[in-house]
Amino acid sequence: MSLPNPNQIIMTTAVKSNKIYFREQFGYFQSIRRKLAIGLIVLFILLPFVRYQSEAALNINVAAQTIRFFAITLYPQDLMIVGILFILAAFMLFYITRLYGRVWCGYTCPQTIWMLMFNWIERRIEGSHQQSKVLDKSGLNIHKIFKKVLKHSIWLLIAWLTACTFISYFVPVEELYFNLFNFKDYFLTQNWIIFFTVCTYINAGWVREKMCLHMCPYARFQSVLFDNHTKLVSYDEVRGESRGARKRNQIKSSGLGDCIDCKLCVDVCPVGIDIRNGLQYECINCGLCIDACDSVMDSFNYPRGLIKYNNLTDPVYRWKPHLTYGSVTLLAFLSLLIWIINRSDFEVDLQRDRNALYRVNYAGTVENTYTIKVLNKSQNAKEFQVTLQDNSEFVLEKQPIFRLLGGQSKTQVISVSSNSNQPLGKKQIVLQVTDLTKQNINTIYTRFYSPKQ
Ligand code: SF4
Ligand code: SF4
């Protein structure tokens, strides 16, 4: 089977500035994609309504700078975790791309899902892709105005619902919809919703595949992730050529390949390319052309698979390099998960008094003051006690207890004084903050200053 080398992706001229009227196609891959898209949309809509301990289970609070995910709340101090999570997600995406090409784009990317959803609405209102084309070329009349107004109204409604759902990841649903319908907090809710409504409407309704072709950076560099093991949608040139029209059940004349040149694979392509010209950077590996071609092959009693997901190398061998990449990424994900689960759920910050290194108190002993800040990163109320690690030379006044609600922080000034009247110079002392619920201890090393001899 002759397949294009993934390292020789053709920069086609298939990118059209005009609207692509692509035909609806049903089949195996389209069914997988539709089910996956419906599942993801339902998840996107329902997630903000999920509650955990009477609050939104998933919430990104921009004002408080926190991300809440069920029992975990991440603070700016956990930026490293978020950063590593994004890096690992990118590695996972690269891994999937190396295995199956741009399946992220074809099956799960919101741009593709929303574009196909808008196209589905267009087909229901304007008819087939050909009828839609004719309608666009026809002059202005009541029939056309009605269809266009109806289509754009539904598009706008879906865009508005999308924007509301998106914002509900940042503003809890009950607060968002209360503000929305009572015209409260105008800037933060109404304006952002209008902004995202316009973005969704323009992207999915007008920009469509041009976003993937001209604006998405991932689309531009994804081809460097392909190798000879990557499964890409490809046309079997040896079997298909030379192409030519013929009648069903007619014996194939010599010299003709299996491609009947019906161009169905081109009609169904959402990015408007002809896969028979070889691997092209516009291809999002959606498999629509496979379903289309398989239906043609069935009707001509030819074997399926003239267009199919294929790779250049022996399928038995291809898993070897992928396993290493996948195992390392999975291991990194598991390590990150263990880190998140075991991280301390309180943060302590200690600052020395900047105005005076020390002072001599009424008892004649040397005293140092510190400002301690305790942040309860858990979602439950907790008590934390500050103590001085066993040290006969120093004493911590009062051993303060911090009673903090989930997410609350408190700052307090504490004093450590020397037990002796003898000069000590500079000494290290160790303070401990104990979570009295879990008996977790956070240890802080600092210095105690007193006059030298
Ligand atoms: S759908 Fe199949 S038979 Fe028809 S033009 Fe495309 S490759 Fe050829
Ligand atoms: S060529 Fe086939 S797989 Fe690629 S985008 Fe077009 S329909 Fe999808």
Image (cartoon, grey):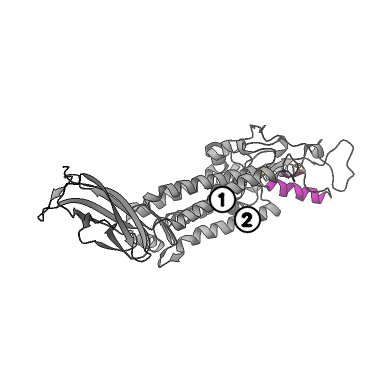
Q: Quadrant of residue 229?
A: top right
Q: Which residue is mark 1?
A: 331
The magenta stretch spans which residues? 285-310
- 362 relative position to 168: left or right: left
Under circle 1, the secondary element is helix
Q: Nearer the viewer, residue 62 or 124?
A: 62
Residue 233 screen position, x and y as percent: 69, 43
Q: Quadrant of the C terminus?
A: top left
Residue type beneath disc 2 = Arg
Q: Nearer the viewer, residue 354 or 430?
A: 430
Question: What kind of residue is marked 1?
Answer: Leu
Q: Which sits earlier in the primary sequence, circle 1 or circle 2?
A: 2
Which residue is outermost to the bottom?
Answer: 54
From the Cβ of disc 2, is ligand 2 less than 8 Å away? no
- Please report the residue visible at 23 percent of the width from the left and 52 percent of the height from the top: 371
- Residue 210, quarter of the rendered image: top right
Q: Are marks 1 and 2 in contact (CB under 8 Å)?
A: no
In this view, the residue in front, 197 or 321, is: 321
Q: Quadrant of the N terminus?
A: top right
Task: Say if residue 396 shows up in the picture.
Answer: yes
Residue assigned mark 2? 34
* Residue 302 appears left or right of 84: right
x, y percentage for residue 152? 51, 51
Give the Cα separation between the discs numbered 1 and 2.
31 Å
141 falls in the magenta region = no
Q: Which residue is drawn at the image coordinates 84% and 50% (left, top)?
A: 301
Q: Quarter-wise, where is residue 267 in the image?
A: top right
Q: Dot 1: few (<14), some (14–19), or many (≥20) neighbours within 10 Å?
A: few
Dot 2: element: helix
Asked if residue 295 lies in the magenta stretch, the reply is: yes
